[in-house]
């Protein structure tokens, strides 16, 4: 029987998951998001058009593939409705290709308010959340108070909503200052009525049936391993399990049904929001990376922090996820540099280590210098045209991690992808 392949981020998100999911979707009958919500922004480019997806899986542009929003995802109905409308306006047939899990939790307008109040109260220690209500919604899920998509079909849906909203108002009393944000409850309910037209499914059953019919399934991660609630740089993380295990719980797939695990990483590192980032470059080199890589958030527009590739963090992510193949993105961005540094270890106090300390802010990077290729990669379409220094860079990473790099991306477009 077929297994579920997983594609997920190995760094701090924005590795280019959306682009690669779109590229490989023709190989899959189902593409499914398993965690996160509209904090994600997955960008795809083809035919000179750019699209950013927040909740909808990145397989939506291909015919013959079903897209499932799994039980582990949190949905903001207003954002999802807007996404669907925008796609339909550009000619994408969303209706016949999108399914929503009955167990996915809903982001209420008051969850966004709680998110904003919580961040505001943290002051300079703030997480740098996207303020989409993600944390409070997952808190209600684990606190056993949440509202699920399937609950909306019950006759007492409005009462359930009102009870939860009332609880949120009680929580809000605990904050000294409550930011003023528009709650837009009418738009929320309108969006709910709109979404109820879509097929509501049990993602576990849908996927099991597909596998039994020998159809392939891809699970699309959001965020990245270093933002995982358990394995990321806590507390500067998101509120879900972004790792392979999250695909099991976020879709209802048993661990022994997981197949290939494709781990995606940028040829350097970025991070948006607060939290430790050992290789961060707060200088003109980091500025040049940001400019060349157009490193501004797809969801919030914030400037992304930039730095060199961090191999100890990458190896850690490979271990936790059981990565079987690597995908390297944005190699073209490094074309501007004469030399390329790679972090191959950390100094933590007196110690030199390859392991991730509990407080990553204590780690000072130890670098290895490699030669840059100083040539344009964006028009390359086959591996034999790679400059020698790029091949050396790839081989170095493969040797360090022990995992093959199966795809190299040299630009944002679908076509700028080299399968090895
Ligand atoms: P995701 O959240 O992992 O899907 O990634 P994002 O879409 O947030 O960020 C990746 C950004 O890099 C997007 O703007 C992509 O269009 C762009 N991108 C993806 N692959 C490449 C690449 O190989 N080279 C360049 N220059 N840009 C890329
Ligand atoms: P994609 O799927 C990059 C970051 C936020 C913040 C922290 C918590 O596009 O890779 P949250 O909104 O979850 O409370 O924010 O996580 N973050 C992301 N950073 N890419 C993302 O998603 C992110 N989703 C959340 O910036 O630091
Ligand atoms: Mg993104």
Image: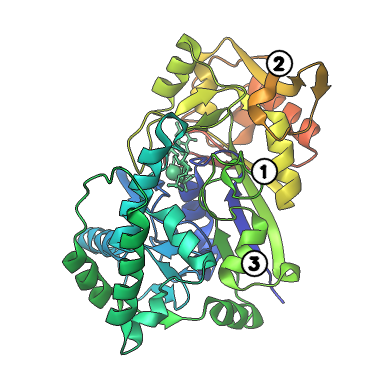
The answer to which image quadrant residue 61 occupies is: bottom left
Judge from the rendering whether residue 140 lies leftward or rightward of residue 391; answer left or right.
Answer: left
Q: How crowded is mark 1: few (under 14 residues within 10 Å), some or many (20 or more)?
A: many
Judge from the rendering whether residue 414 lies leftward or rightward of residue 159; answer left or right.
Answer: right
Near-viewer residue (61 or 310):
310
The answer to which of marks 2 and 1 sits earlier in the sequence is 1
Element on which disc 3 rests:
helix
Disc nearest the viewer among 3 and 1: 3
The answer to which image quadrant residue 150 occupies is: bottom left
The answer to which image quadrant residue 148 occupies is: bottom left
Q: Where the C terminus falls, by quadrant?
A: top right
Q: Is residue 319 above or below residue 154?
A: above
Contact? badges 2 and 1 (CB < 8 Å): no
Percent x, y of residue 127: 47, 38
Near-viewer residue (371 or 270):
270
What residue would you read off at disc 3?
248
Element on which disc 2 rests:
strand
Residue depicted at 53% across the width and 76% down the height: 203
Residue depicted at 62% across the width and 22% down the height: 387
What residue would you read off at disc 2?
367
* Gap between marks 3 and 1 measured at Cα: 20 Å
Percent x, y of residue 85: 23, 63
Q: In this view, does 208 lie above or below 24?
A: below
Contact? badges 3 and 1 (CB < 8 Å): no
Disc nearest the viewer among 2 and 1: 2
Res. 217 visible in picture: no
User: On residue 326, which mark appears?
Assistant: 1
Element on which disc 1 rests:
strand
Q: How crowded is mark 3: few (under 14 residues within 10 Å), some or many (20 or more)?
A: many
* Gap between marks 3 and 2 measured at Cα: 36 Å
């Amino acid at each position: 029987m077929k297994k579920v392949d997983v594609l997920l981020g190995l760094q701090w998100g924005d590795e280019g998951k959306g682009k690669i999911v779109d590229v490989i979707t023709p190989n899959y009958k189902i593409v499914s998001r398993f965690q996160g919500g509209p904090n994600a922004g997955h960008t795809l480019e083809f035919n000179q058009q750019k699209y950013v997806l927040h909740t909808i899986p990145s397989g939506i542009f291909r015919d013959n593939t079903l897209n499932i929003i799994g039980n582990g995802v949190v949905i903001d109905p207003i954002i999802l409705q807007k996404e669907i409308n925008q796609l339909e306006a550009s000619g994408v047939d969303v209706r016949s290709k999108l399914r929503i899990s009955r167990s996915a939790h809903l982001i209420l307008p008051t969850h966004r308010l709680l998110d904003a109040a919580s961040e505001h109260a943290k002051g300079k220690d703030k997480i740098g959340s996207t303020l989409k209500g993600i944390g409070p919604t997952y808190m209600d899920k684990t606190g056993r108070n949440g509202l699920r998509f399937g609950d909306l079909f019950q006759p007492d849906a409005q009462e359930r909503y009102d009870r939860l909203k009332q609880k949120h108002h009680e929580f809000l009393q605990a904050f000294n200052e409550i930011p003023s944000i528009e709650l837009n409850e009418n738009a929320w309910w309108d969006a709910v009525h709109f979404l109820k037209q879509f097929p509501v499914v049990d993602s576990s059953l849908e996927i099991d049936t597909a596998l039994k019919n020998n159809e392939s399934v891809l699970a699309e991660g959001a965020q990245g391993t270093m933002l995982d609630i358990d394995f990321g740089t806590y507390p500067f993380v998101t509120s879900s399990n972004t790792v392979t295990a999250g695909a099991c719980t976020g879709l209802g797939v048993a661990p022994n049904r997981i197949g290939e695990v494709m781990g995606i990483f940028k040829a350097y590192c970025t991070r948006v929001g607060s939290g430790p980032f050992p290789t961060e470059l707060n200088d003109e080199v980091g500025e040049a990376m940001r400019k060349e890589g157009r490193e501004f958030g797809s969801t919030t527009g914030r400037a992304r922090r930039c730095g060199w590739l961090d191999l100890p963090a990458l190896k850690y992510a490979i271990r936790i996820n059981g990565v079987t193949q690597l995908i390297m993105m944005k190699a073209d961005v490094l074309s501007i540099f004469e030399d390329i540094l790679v972090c191959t270890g950390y100094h933590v106090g007196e110690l030199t280590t390859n392991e991730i300390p509990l407080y990553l802010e204590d780690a000072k990077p130890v670098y290895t210098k490699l030669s840059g290729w100083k040539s344009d990669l964006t028009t390359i379409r086959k591996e034999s045209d790679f400059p020698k220094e790029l091949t050396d860079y790839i081989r170095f990473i493969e040797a360090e991690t022990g995992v093959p790099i199966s795809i190299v991306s040299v630009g944002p477009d679908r076509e700028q992808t080299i399968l090895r």
